[in-house]
Amino acid sequence: MDSLKAVPQQESRLHFLDYWRIIRIRKTVILAVFLLVFVTATIVTFILPEQFAATARIKVTRTAPDTGGLEVQANQGGYDPYFIQTEFEIMKSADVLDRVIDSLKLNTVWGHKYNGGDNVMKTADTEGILKGRLSLNPVRNTTLIDITVYSDKPQEAADLANALADAYSEKRKEDNDKLENRGLATLKEQNAEQEKIIADQSKNVEALRKQFNIPDSDPNSSGPGQTLENNVIQEIQSSLNTFEVQYEQLATNLATLSGMDKQKLRTVLPRAVDNPDSQLMSLLDQLNMAQQRFLQVKADLKPENPVYQMALEATNDLNIKIDNCVDGIMVGMETKLASYKAVVDSQRAKLDKAKLTDVARAEETRPYYDAKDQLERSKNFQKILEMKILSKTTDAALPMTTMVQTIETAKPDTTPVRPKKTLNIILGIVIGLVVGVGLAFFIEYLDTSVKTIDDVERALQAPVLGVIPQNVGVLLQEGAESPHAEAYRVLRTNLLFSRKDDKLNTVCVVSAGAGEGKSTTILNLATAFAQSGDRVLLVDSDLRRPTLHKMLKLSNSLGLTNCLLKQNTLEEVIQRTSLPSLDLLPSGKLPSSSLSILSSAQMRELITELKRRYDFVFFDSPPIMGVSDASVLASEVDMTVQVIQYRRYPQPMNIRAKQMVEKVGGNLIGIVLNNINMSQDESYYYYSGYYHGYYYYSRDEDQVPASETGATVAAGDKPADKPGEIKQKY
């Protein structure tokens, strides 16, 4: 078994029992805080004056008349998430509260009540008190508001709630009337100004009309009227359109006819022109008749016949006349086409000139028409104003009672609502427990001392050899069957198994600070070894504050210092105790010139001699953090045991003590946890429970108490020094 290496500890996780352990250990703090909070809450609850509440419920809607008005509200019916909260602030405003104060004369009433005598309270102070008693709460998913007022009188609470509801309703109506009247007055003023503007603009339009000599047939129209230039342009345009149509038709007919021969023209011309030529038609008829006669003559007569010759000549003569007539018609059509083109060109020239004249006239008369257009817009705007005024006037005349409706009036309630005694007491209990437990855990968090075996093995990386319970006395006085003896027997067994060699028989017990029960631990451990049959020597090497001779009731006139200074032999300074196998080497008196005597060669020789004479030698030492003696002893003995008192010094201090032992080459074999409160800490309950159950003993009723004989010394405590004895501080 390797005593110098502790088994690595895994990271511990808090269990429910760990929390319960903290609560049991800190139960005094928890109980004190709990009682303080509980008693304070109870006293304050019963001292506070009773308060009564009265609630008035009102329905609040946006500003709108009872019946639909002419005005269309832009946001009417829309959801406003801030509407109710805004109304809350209005209800708590000085304007509404002052109405309540004036209606109920609260300055005078509360002045007599709070200021005494005939003093009248200031309005600002009254507002503050009233606002503090007021509570506004919306009814979920509705537009209803509960107005709750608290007072020490039920009737006063009801009157205040109803007065506040009425004051708020009146303010809403007055504010709406002010807004409506102010808006209506503004509209009327603007309408009057608009009338003046229209009159001035009308005069300007008339002056411009006369200036430019404009025959405006419609003075109310916004654009230019039908002028002479417009009529001329229209006539020219109409004539031009007619001639252009005729010209196009004639040009088309002429182009078609020009490609035909004369024989075809005879057939087509009568149908191609609108007015067929009468001469051509007559010649065509004559030609037809002449051809018929010629055919008759031709059938009966020969060509040499004079009649035949006359019929043929008549036919040829008519053909010549018809061709000449056709040519004349074609020439006439060309002449007519040329005349149409001349007319069209003339009309176009006239139209362009007329348009230029019209544009110039329009540019000249533009100021008139601009002024006329501005006048028209002004008149339209005035019509809108007049409609708005009419709408506002009609809406203002409609009743507005539905903006604020009282659903339930406040009624006096004789049952007080404040203070809530049961709730306050329960809260006092809960808060007291929570604060107490929280404070206990906070103190436990700040406490960095050693609390459990796991703390030792995790922080110091050293095994725990033994756990010593609280209020342990001297085993020589309590006897071998003392309920505490088994704890030291366990410590003895662990120490023996921690040795690497059976020749290691010198043990030094050290501690980080004073009062950790180091002297009691080494005395009882030596007693446990002696009771087991070993020859044991106790060496009180705590030269600064020796204690072992007091606990064993022996003399300290001669001791270790005398032996080291060669003043006395070892046999002269060693004293016998009541236990035959246990001897004591007291410290003796320490001269001021021999403070480093423990680090001398004589000390090392003495330790060698004692190892030879005794089975085990135990050395007591001063706190290792105070002086260097303990470090010297740890380096000279075979084994070192560190005593740590339960919940006394911070862990860094104990770690530092262990490091000091290791730095000087000491063999630290383990840790002893001392002064454990077994009744409070379940982590160590199995130790005391086993000891008491297995080693039971009874004491005589007439036994002298240990406190009277001085035999019982609590672990970690040292008896008071005798009068006149020199005591040096560490």
Image (tube, rainbow, N blue to C red):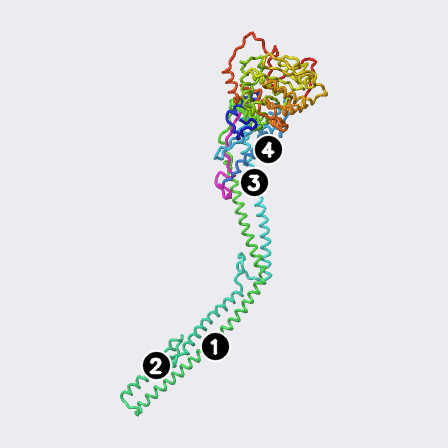
Q: Residues within 10 Å of mark 1 (few under 14, many from 20)?
A: some
Q: Residues within 10 Å of mark 2 (few under 14, many from 20)?
A: few
Amino acid tagged 3 = Leu
The label shown at residue 338 is 1
The label shown at residue 179 is 3
Q: Is residue 174 above or below residue 231?
A: above
Q: Mark 2 or mark 3, which has the lower sequence index?
A: 3
The outermost residue toward the right is 593
Q: Tell me the SS state at disc 1.
A: helix
- Nearer the camera: disc 4 or disc 1: 4
Amino acid tagged 4 = Ala
| In front of the other: 65 or 110 | 110
Q: Position of residue 110 (x, y in %)?
A: 60, 25
Q: Position of residue 283 (x, y in %)?
A: 36, 82
- Nearer the camera: disc 2 or disc 1: 1
Q: Mark 2 or mark 1, which has the lower sequence index?
A: 2
Q: Tell me the SS state at disc 2.
A: helix
The label shown at residue 94 is 4
**CA distance separating discs 4 and 1:** 99 Å
Is residue 312 located in the magenta-colored stretch of the structure? no
Q: Mark 4 or mark 3, which has the lower sequence index?
A: 4
The magenta segment is: 49-78
| In front of the other: 133 or 39 | 39
Q: Which residue is mark 2?
A: 285
**CA distance separating discs 4 and 3:** 20 Å
Image quarter (top left, top right, bottom left or bottom right) of the C terminus: top right
